[in-house]
Image (tube, rainbow, N blue to C red):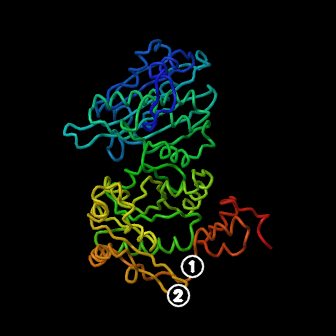
Amino acid sequence: MAISLRGDQEISSVPDTKSKALRINLNRDIYGTFAEIGAGQETARNFFRSGAASGTIAKAMSAYDKDFSDAIYGIEEDRRYVSQSRLQKMLRHEIDLIEYRLSREKHPNKLFFSYANTVTTIDFARTFKGHGWVGIRFQLDPLDDYNEIVLHLRFKETDARLQQETLGVLGVNLIYGAFYLNDNPKELVKSFYDNLGSHQIEIDMINFSGPRFMYVDNRLMSLQLLKNGMTNAVMFGPDGNNLLPAQVLYNKNILALRGSFRPVTKVNMDMFENSKKLFLSENKVTKEKTQIIFEITLSNLTAEGKINERDFLDRAELLCSLGQNVMITNFQQYFKLVEYFSEFTKERMALAMGVYNLIQIFDEKYYRDLSGGILEAFGKLFYRNLKVYLYPYHDQEKDEYINSENLNVHPRMKELYKFFKNNGRLIDIKDFDKSNLDIFSRTVLKMITDGEKGWEEMLPEGIAETIKQKRLFGYSKTRDKK
């Protein structure tokens, strides 16, 4: 037995890698192939070393040469070898071969599987640490269809040999979890870090599919990666499937809108439409090369002390219904979000926010953990000509609209504020709808839960119907006041 370091935290005693591989090998029904590209055959090696592998491993191969790989699995449209599409072709091809070559009559109880990975480890110059795709396609009943788990990892270690060993341990964890932890997907996700630490790998995307995972919401599995400290940001699309942030954001102009979206209101969509118009009018920004992100921070999801998964899914349901890509991050400070985006693109970036969020940016207390304080944070936030599109606030007492021109910041921050304002970094959203400015998500939420009337008019078209139809945010038809 070994101590598991899940997210660098000591959790409990779990089987070591050899014990996991041996348990698989000793199961007479589990039988499959290993296809590994880019880092040797480290996963298969663990099964060979543990003993009794002849009953488990039908074939272990490494189609390392690109021409051979293309001859076996076909040529990708984008000519890439480390990709999700390549991995899934590998998984399906190898399962098809098992089904073709082995008679079900002779092996009626066999549970077939194919495990595959396609990765690139750290380069010689050590400028790129490497990443990869790992997956398994497997049966839990000989008569059932296949299940599939696919994940993306980013290496953190700076030695190729260590990266190979880490990949081998992760592969064993995935295969073991697929067969022995499939009844609890949350624990299955946690088990990926058994005998590993978050200083070794980052797992930033995962998708479950197949009959065993019919009722698994992949957005919730994405949230588990964040909760477990396996990554700092996850993304999912309008269809509810998880997306790889690096793939979606690569070389794109990025406009991000942060909010609670609990629920999404007319204010959010007015900010979205106006900031999008401003962003697309910027030099070198085109619609085809632009990615708009609705972002929610993990701290926002834990505002009530712990994450309410139902509440999270309710927010996700509405944003997805509007056709938006949603990102959940662990970046409470805006400059960290911008740093993250900068890993994937050198193109234009912009943030859309309300006055309250801008005031927080100029609050020194948020930067006490930085040696350079707020100046260091602003250097990271604005060093690449970042623009902030500011949505005004309606001061009801004074009946005044607060924007960048009349906003009051702390006296110590006035000169810094003027510097960024006068350099064109803060752009006021002027074509806003005044009728929306007195709409607040918390007010709408309270009206929904209390069964009050009138909240429907505060939401974008179709959102109220979705809330009622799917009973989101505690909506109950019986509580609607007559």
Which residue is at the far front? 411
In the displayed structure image, the side of residue 1 where residue 337 appears, left or right: left
**Measured along the vertical axis of the image, is residue 232 above or below residue 211?**
below
Q: Measured from the top left, where is residue 474 in percent x and y? A: 69, 59
Residue at horizontal 32%, vertical 44%? 79
SS under mark 2: loop
Q: Measured from the top left, where is residue 342 in percent x and y? A: 31, 56
Task: Tell me where residue 67 sits by quadrant.
Answer: top left
Q: Name the N-terminal-most of marks 1 and 2.
A: 2
Q: Nearer the viewer, residue 384 or 79?
A: 384
Please name the amino acid that badge 1 sits on: Asp
Q: Measured from the top left, where is residue 280 in percent x and y? A: 36, 72
Name the residue beneath numbered marker 1. Answer: 438
Q: How many marks?
A: 2
Q: Nearer the viewer, residue 468 or 425?
A: 425
- CA gap between label 1 and label 2 equals 11 Å
Please name the amino acid that badge 2 sits on: Asp
Label for residue 399? 2
**Measured along the vertical axis of the image, is residue 334 above or below residue 241?**
below
Tag nearer the camera, 1 or 2:
2
Q: Nearer the viewer, residue 280 or 181?
A: 181
Specify few, some or many for label 1: CA neighbours under 10 Å numbering under 14, 14-19, or 20 or more: few
Quadrant that contains the C terminus: bottom right
